[in-house]
Image: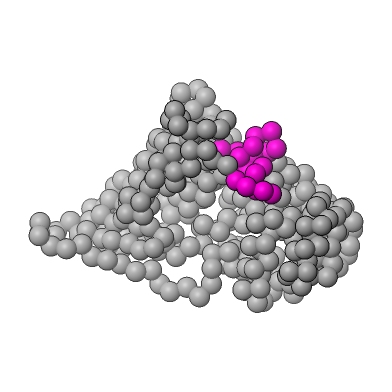
Amino acid sequence: MIRMAIVGVGWAGQRQLRAIKELGRDIVVAGLVDCDEDFLQQQAIAFGIHATWVDRQTMLADPSIDAVSICVPQALHCPIALDAARAGKHILCEKPMALTVDEATQMIETAQQHHVKLYVAENEVYIPMVRFLRDIVQTGAYVGEVVSASVVNGFRAPHFVYPGRRSWLTEPDKGGTGTWMLHGIHTVAQMRYIFGEVATVYLREHITPSSIGPTEGTMSGLLTFENGLSVSIVQTREAHIDGRLGGFILRGEHGTLHATPSGCTFWPSDMTSHAASIPLTYPPDSLSSYAHEIAAFADYVAGRSVGPTTGVSERCSLAVVQAGYESVRTGLPVMLQERFGRL
């Protein structure tokens, strides 16, 4: 049984606590860490956790703690992960794992040096839609060979603010980021799991007059994958995207498939003009995506399997996001291997 301490008991930390309880195996929450002592005690009582620390270094010195889950503002992910690795603790880190590829590399190398496992809590890779689409691409089911694809994700939030303890998420001076890093990292991780590794990133930024805030409103453009597939992408906080309009569209030699988290529709290429589309359903899943990421972390620490969101994997997702920002600044495509080397 892995004894884990949750560092940061805001929304993400609480979601980790519920996921660990949902999973019901392999991991036990041995304590909570938060710099707000009053809030920390409230959450400890609410979740029935007895051990608490305001100072994370005291927690890291406790030999009974095997692992930490880092659920704090993302600017703190790297320094906390480095401290945890040096203390011999396995690490589950919320997405994005860091703010830059260089930080992610530091985290990976330090974990390797101290013989601990580093995993990323990227739950959106574990939803049924993503596993279904990965299988479609790998097997050629329904659509055959995919010849093009597009991904649209986001929501309308022109003021782009979060209340209370989550306000830092969109405040750059507190380590917050825009929608491309905050939400696009999910979309990129999904795309990489479905289509493979990205070779080139070419994006543009858009900000409507109604958007308020210092960060990007919409990122759109083209990702070219190492297998030659080109995928158009839109990640936005400016437009309302009805469920029927967003999601993944795969166009293949045998038909076109549109997938959202709630369901999937397939149009065979040999359909007559009056024929109806074919609804598809995903295999049932008894666990939430959050419980799946916890299970994958536990399996990784135990050496049973290597899941899809290791630190090495999610450094690649971060590289795509970082390259997207760099493409916006330069107006040019960014070739990932040329920019970052082989990740």
In the foreground, 164 or 269: 164
Q: Nearer the viewer, residue 181 or 243?
A: 243
User: Which residue corresponds to the image point at 16% horizontal and 63% vertical from the top-left?
Assistant: 276
Residue 9 lies left or right of residue 157; in this view the side is right
Reply above or below: 195 against 202: below
Say if residue 66 shows up in the picture: no
Q: Is residue 123 visible?
A: yes
In the displayed structure image, the side of residue 31 where residue 168 appears, left or right = left
At a point 51% along the width and 57% down the height, the residue shown is 124
**Front one among 163 and 141:** 163
| Image coordinates for residue 225, horizontal then vertical, percent | 42, 43
In the image, residue 124 sits, relative to residue 31, either above or below, namely above
- Image quadrant of residue 292? bottom right
* Location of residue 294 with respect to 154 vertically, above or below: below
Q: Which residues are magenta?
A: 162-178
In the picture, the quarter occupied by the C terminus is top right
Residue at the outermost top position: 330
**Residue 205 spot, x, y in % from top left:** 46, 30
Q: Quadrant of the N terminus?
A: bottom right
Confirm whether the magenta stretch covers residue 176. yes
Give percent across and percent down for residue 14.
Answer: 67, 62
Q: Residue at x 35, y 51 (%)?
A: 242
Residue sitting at x 62%, y 47%: 163
Q: How many marks?
A: 0
Q: Which sits in the foreground, 241 or 184? A: 241
- The reply to whether the magenta stretch includes residue 333 is no
Q: How is colour applied across the structure in the image?
A: one colour
> Residue 159 in the image: x percent, y percent?
52, 38
